[in-house]
Image (cartoon, rainbow, N blue to C red):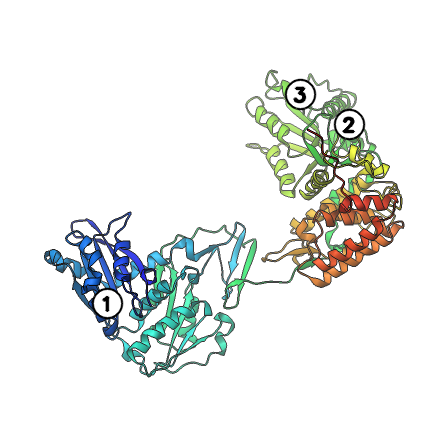
């Protein structure tokens, strides 16, 4: 039984010879009986607007169904709507003959007899109004999947493209399915039944379009009730080779969609099919081959991709055409593949001297907290730095140097002073001006003399770029940039600053840099998450062990964090983690000191290099060219079994890199590592116990539900103890209410 919503309705715009545009509103009635009064409701709904049609067309198929519809339209029960349209909007009935593909058109309002020829002419242009119906159905926003920036779809054919067509997403009702089936019938069978003398099978590439083909078979049954047509999916490219070449005239192949029409051409070439025995429902107007074999050509401008290989691929597999579910890529950090001596050598060489710190502000009252903090005042006094500076100054200082410019901070001013002293003592060069960035605009400098620019510690380099910008209009001579230590989020920022500062129209400026580190974004994010979750004013930390309370007051401030960077360990939670001999990424003879910030910084650089360095083999890289999860192999926490290293890995990893919920074995392994650390919390093997459980509570480490519950159960049993460890576990997991009592106002 069909009600008004079971009709497929669409508008067809017709351009007359004079240039006027007329709107024909079509309603297609699929096979089936009508609900009484349905046509009246349908006609009124079609004329409600907002755009009033210039003509209303009811489309039926088959001689019996069409005759029944026309009879109902002429009965008194269907006259109410027609009376409202009378002399205002012409109403037509079009009967589509399935056997011949011709139309029998009836005008139901004699008032428009003078326009009968023009109205009939529009209706007889079958290809045109079918195209309009498909255009309204296959809207680009409904059928096109666009790959995110940096990705491309890797299709079952192996080709890659920025878009993927999914016509089945537009088939949201039985009426729309029926209309596509009619359009398919008109293209393949109408007036051409002799091409298929013994049709037995309709092959489809995916069951997603099976409803369309079943509706097509229903139309074939109307013509010949005795003919049985089988519908069979060959599962796109996955089952293509298993299909035996069909005999001529016995099969039809319907392909859902293709931007290149490659599968269409492959069916013709490999299965020896005639061109009329293959139809692709949807393709692009820009397709180069076999466009005549497509039911509808979608007008869509494909955005050009960047030259070169696509960074990441979303692999489409199977007949569902969904992204392939690849197993997680597990990365085990190794000395051979992930070593980055040039970036981390300063961390071990200067460990213990207070040069490096974590999650600290530069001065009291400052807003910005640095994940990896470099104390410029301490750095420029180190022997390593002084030796480096003097060697480079001896080679790079120009005799024409007249000015030293420095960043607006104390350590850069001291560095500029040291440079000036060295030039005077070594070369007898008395540099006239020593000015800060703040003074640069108001001070005249020798435009042709050499300039030295000093910066003790640099992040993104905004102050240096401002100096460079200001000098552009004031200075044409040689320039030497001296950078103490730069800490950035990515290696591209490190390279970009050097490139921007060295840039000159003719001869590049000189630049020397003592050290640099690309540390990523996760270290800062994790510290912020820890502070906002556990150390807010609404939480009572008075029950925490003394060292943990001391740590709360230090991190994120301008005071030295040092050995309080990581959570303490031991039964009383009073010991600070320290690094033992044998760290793979440091020399074997380094001094044994409490060097938490330096180890954290080392792992930050190591993990960021593993993510983005092209020198790391793809199979070892903490990234992937395909659409899959990349995780740190839990084995890393067995290989690097110093608590300080384990904690450094946790704090620098992305949450997705420690999410083991999609791998039962990895989740189980990680559960065992955490439980082992908890049970041996008063030994060296359990130094990172609190770091593990905090990461678990902050969802930095994610395990399967049953594994997480096992860890929480062990922690809860240990939290019943009144020891410092028990109180810390109770606080982290909130086994007791840590919130302060509500104020009475």
- Secondary structure under badge 3? strand
Q: Position of residue 737 (x, y in %)?
A: 76, 42
Q: CA distance from mark 1 to mark 3?
A: 89 Å
Q: Could you tell which of marks 2 and 3 lies nearer the N-terminus?
A: 2
Task: Compare residues 635 and 27 and report the one nearer the observer.
Answer: 27
Q: CA distance from mark 2 to mark 3?
A: 17 Å
Q: Could you tell which of marks 1 and 2 lies nearer the N-terminus?
A: 1
Residue drawn at x 83%, y 53% is: 717
The answer to whether residue 84 is visible is: yes
- The residue that disc 3 covers is 436
Disc 1 residue crowd, few under 14, some 14–19, many 20+, Cα 10 Å: many
- The residue that disc 1 covers is 69
Disc 2 residue crowd, few under 14, some 14–19, many 20+, Cα 10 Å: some
- The residue that disc 2 covers is 377
Q: Quadrant of the N terminus?
A: bottom left
- Secondary structure under badge 1? helix
Circle nearer the viewer, 1 or 2? 1
Q: Position of residue 142 (x, y in %)?
A: 42, 55
Q: CA distance from mark 1 to mark 2?
A: 91 Å
In the displayed structure, does residue 478 sit left or right of residue 164? right
């Amino acid at each position: 039984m069909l009600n008004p919503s079971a009709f497929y309705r669409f508008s067809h715009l017709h351009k007359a010879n004079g240039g006027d545009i007329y709107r024909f509103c079509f309603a297609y009635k699929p096979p089936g009986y009508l609900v009484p009064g349905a046509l009246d409701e349908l006609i009124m709904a079609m004329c409600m607007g907002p755009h009033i049609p210039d003509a209303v067309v009811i489309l039926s198929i088959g001689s019996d169904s069409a005759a029944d519809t026309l009879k109902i339209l002429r009965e008194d029960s269907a006259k109410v709507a027609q009376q409202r349209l009378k002399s205002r909007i012409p109403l037509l009935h079009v009967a589509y003959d399935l056997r011949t593909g011709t139309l029998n058109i009836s005008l139901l309002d004699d008032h428009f007899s003078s326009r009968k020829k023009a109205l009939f002419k529009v209706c007889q242009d079958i290809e045109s109004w079918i195209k309009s119906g498909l255009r309204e159905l296959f809207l680009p926003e409904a059928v096109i999947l666009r790959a995110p920036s940096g990705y491309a779809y890797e299709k079952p054919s192996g080709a890659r493209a920025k878009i993927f067509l999914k016509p089945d997403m537009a088939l949201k009702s039985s009426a729309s399915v029926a209309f596509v089936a009619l359009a398919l019938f008109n293209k393949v069978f109408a007036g051409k039944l002799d091409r298929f003398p013994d049709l037995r099978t309709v092959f489809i590439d995916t069951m997603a379009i099976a409803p369309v083909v079943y509706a097509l078979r229903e139309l074939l049954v109307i013509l010949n009730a005795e003919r049985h047509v089988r519908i069979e999916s060959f599962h796109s490219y996955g089952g293509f080779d298993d299909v035996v070449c069909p005999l001529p005239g016995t099969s039809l192949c319907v392909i859902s969609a293709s931007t290149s029409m490659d599968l269409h051409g492959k069916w013709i070439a490999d299965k020896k099919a005639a061109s009329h025995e293959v139809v692709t429902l949807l393709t692009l107007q820009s397709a180069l081959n076999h466009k005549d074999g497509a039911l509808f050509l979608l007008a869509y401008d494909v955005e050009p991709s960047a030259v070169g290989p696509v960074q990441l691929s979303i692999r489409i597999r199977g007949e569902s055409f969904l992204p392939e579910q690849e197993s997680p890529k597990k990365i085990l950090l190794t000395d051979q593949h992930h070593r980055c001596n040039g970036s981390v050598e300063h961390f071990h060489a200067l460990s213990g001297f207070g040069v490096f710190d974590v999650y600290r502000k530069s001065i009291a009252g400052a807003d910005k907290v640095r994940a990896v903090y470099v104390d410029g005042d301490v750095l420029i006094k180190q022997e390593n730095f002084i030796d480096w500076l003097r060697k480079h100054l001896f080679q790079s200082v120009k005799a024409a140097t007249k000015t030293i410019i420095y960043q607006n901070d104390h350590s850069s001013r001291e560095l500029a002073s040291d440079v000036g002293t060295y030039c005077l003592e070594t070369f007898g060069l008395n540099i006239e001006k020593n000015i800060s960035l703040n003074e640069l605009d108001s001070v005249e400098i020798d435009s042709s003399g050499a300039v030295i620019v000093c910066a003790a510690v640099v992040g993104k380099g905004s102050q240096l770029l401002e100096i460079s910008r200001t000098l552009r209009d004031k200075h044409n001579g040689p320039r030497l940039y001296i950078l103490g230590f730069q800490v950035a989020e990515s290696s591209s920022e490190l390279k970009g600053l050097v490139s921007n500062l060295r840039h000159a129209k003719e001869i590049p400026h000189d630049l020397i840099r003592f050290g640099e580190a690309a540390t990523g974004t996760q270290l800062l994010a994790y510290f912020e998450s820890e502070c906002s979750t556990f150390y807010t004013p609404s939480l009572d930390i008075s029950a925490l062990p003394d060292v943990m309370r001391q740590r709360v007051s230090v991190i994120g401030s301008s005071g030295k964090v040092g050995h309080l960077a990581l959570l303490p360990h031991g039964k009383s939670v009073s010991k600070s983690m320290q690094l033992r001999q044998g760290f793979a990424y440091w020399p074997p003879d380094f001094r044994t000191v409490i060097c938490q910030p330096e180890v954290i910084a080392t792992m930050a650089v190591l993990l960021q290099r593993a993510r983005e360095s092209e020198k790391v083999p793809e199979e070892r890289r903490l990234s992937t060219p395909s659409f899959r999860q990349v995780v740190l192999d839990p084995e890393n926490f067995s290989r690097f079994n110093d608590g300080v290293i384990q904690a450094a890995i946790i704090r620098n990893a992305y949450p997705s890199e420690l999410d083991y919920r999609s791998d039962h074995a990895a989740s189980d392994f990680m559960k065992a590592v955490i439980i082992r650390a908890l049970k041996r919390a008063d030994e060296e093997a359990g130094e990172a116990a609190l770091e593990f459980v905090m990461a678990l509570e902050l969802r930095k480490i994610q395990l399967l539900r049953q594994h997480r519950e096992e860890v929480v159960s062990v922690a809860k049993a240990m939290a019943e103890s009144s020891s410092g460890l028990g109180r810390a576990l109770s606080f982290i997991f909130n086994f007791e209410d840590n919130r302060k009592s509500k104020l009475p106002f």
